[in-house]
């Protein structure tokens, strides 16, 4: 018999440090490294803000890396298992971009390479980038209710555009976690992260994070058919960043705004269950603390949310408008 399909983590956030550099006021991407953190702003109007920022463990800026040309809207940041840094230039609030892009910074390099991408079904706004264990980029859109999961249809090209293909969709469970955008803030995915060992991925909204177990390196299968564990991120001002700690035992988040605090959330233990004799074993072994039983991993993610689907569909249009208006007001208030 399976346990409850969703394990909520009732843990309080703990501040790590405060980021007081005035250039870092629209943070929307974060990764942790052995000696600190790396972060990026989204859609920065000022040239001094459009950089990749390397921070010390106490959140002070120790160096920056410039882009060789102007990015459009850098919304997420991921670190590959080989040390490659990926910047997702994937934001598109007006759904008007013909192409989006990935910036790739190889270990030891100081010049990111640009790779252009295009959707097969028109423009989408996205703020979540994942890197599969094999180094494949995966983009998750900010579509309310059911976000699209897009993967490459071919190799990245230094010149020209690589087409994306729709690999599936993901709907995170609806919660009651308090956040500045109320119900609408629980519907949209604003960031993502891959665990250091590649065995887990996490998607976040303005209200919560949802962690999925990855079997055999198949991130798409984890998102489309896995059962997430909820980690509440209550009342963050405008949370669009999430990262794993270097040891994979906690999540780190940071919000947009002046002098934001870097927060740490301990991760819940994965659930256990009594699996049936016919349950299949995972494709690749992992420590018990990092992976649930096969029976639980196969449970459908939509079990709890399916009964609420009509309500979600009814509110999707209003939610999207509310979020767009609220974000515009917040940006206008900061600039004024």
Image (spheres, rainbow, N blue to C red):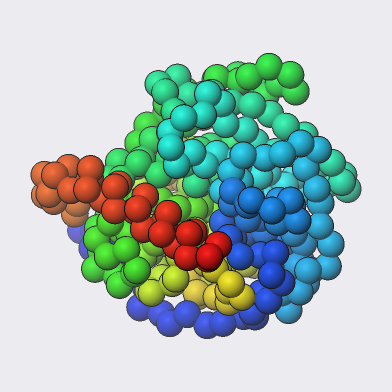
Residue at the (68%, 29%) spot, across then down: 115
Location of residue 82 (image quadrant): top right
Q: Quadrant of the N terminus?
A: bottom left
Residue at the (74%, 19%) spot, across then down: 159
The image position of residue 41, as x and y in percent, is 63, 55
Q: Is residue 120 above or below residue 82?
A: above
The image position of residue 310, as x and y in percent, is 11, 44
Residue at the (73%, 79%) spot, across then down: 58
Q: Is residue 220 above or below residue 247?
A: above
Q: Is residue 262 above or below residue 205?
A: below
98 lies left or right of 277: right
83 lies left or right of 210: right
The image position of residue 171, as x and y in percent, is 30, 46
50 lies left or right of 243: right
Q: Is residue 199 above or below residue 239?
A: above
- Is residue 147 something one can see in this rendering? yes
- Is residue 270 something one can see in this rendering? no
Residue at the (41%, 80%) spot, across then down: 11
- In this view, the residue in front, 320 or 148, is 320
- How many callouts does the rendering have? 0
Q: Residue furthest front?
A: 336
95 lies left or right of 73: left
Location of residue 230 (image quadrant): bottom left
The image position of residue 213, as x and y in percent, is 45, 52
């Amino acid at each position: 018999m399976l346990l409850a399909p969703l394990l909520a983590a009732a843990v309080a956030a703990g501040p790590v440090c405060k980021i007081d550099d005035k250039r870092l006021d629209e943070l929307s991407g974060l990764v942790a490294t052995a000696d600190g953190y790396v972060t990026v702003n989204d859609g920065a109007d000022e040239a001094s803000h459009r950089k990749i920022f390397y921070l010390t463990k106490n959140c002070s800026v120790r160096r920056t890396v410039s882009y060789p040309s102007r990015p459009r809207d850098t919304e997420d940041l991921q670190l590959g298992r080989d040390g490659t840094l990926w910047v997702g230039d994937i934001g598109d609030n007006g759904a008007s971009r013909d192409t989006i892009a990935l910036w790739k910074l190889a270990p030891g390099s100081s010049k990111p390479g640009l790779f252009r991408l295009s959707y097969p079904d028109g423009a989408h706004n996205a703020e979540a980038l994942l890197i599969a264990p094999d180094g494949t980029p995966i983009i998750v859109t900010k579509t309310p209710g059911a976000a699209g999961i897009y993967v490459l249809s071919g190799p990245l090209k230094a010149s020209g555009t690589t087409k994306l293909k729709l690999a599936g969709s993901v709907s995170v469970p609806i919660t009651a976690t308090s956040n500045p955008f109320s119900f609408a803030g629980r519907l949209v995915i604003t960031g993502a992260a891959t665990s250091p060992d590649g065995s887990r991925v996490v998607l976040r909204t303005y209200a919560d994070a949802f962690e999925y177990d990855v079997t055999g390196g198949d991130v798409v299968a984890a998102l489309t058919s896995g059962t997430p564990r909820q980690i509440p991120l209550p009342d963050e001002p405008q949370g669009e960043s999430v990262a794993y700690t270097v040891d994979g035992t906690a999540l780190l988040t940071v919000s947009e705004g002046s002098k934001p605090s870097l927060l740490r959330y301990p991760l819940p233990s994965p659930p256990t269950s009594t699996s049936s004799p016919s349950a299949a074993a995972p494709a690749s072994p992992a420590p018990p603390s990092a992976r649930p039983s096969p029976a639980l991993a196969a449970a459908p993610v939509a079990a709890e949310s399916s009964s609420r689907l009509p309500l979600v569909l009814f509110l999707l249009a209003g939610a999207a408008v509310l979020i767009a208006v609220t974000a515009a007001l917040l940006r206008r208030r900061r600039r004024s």
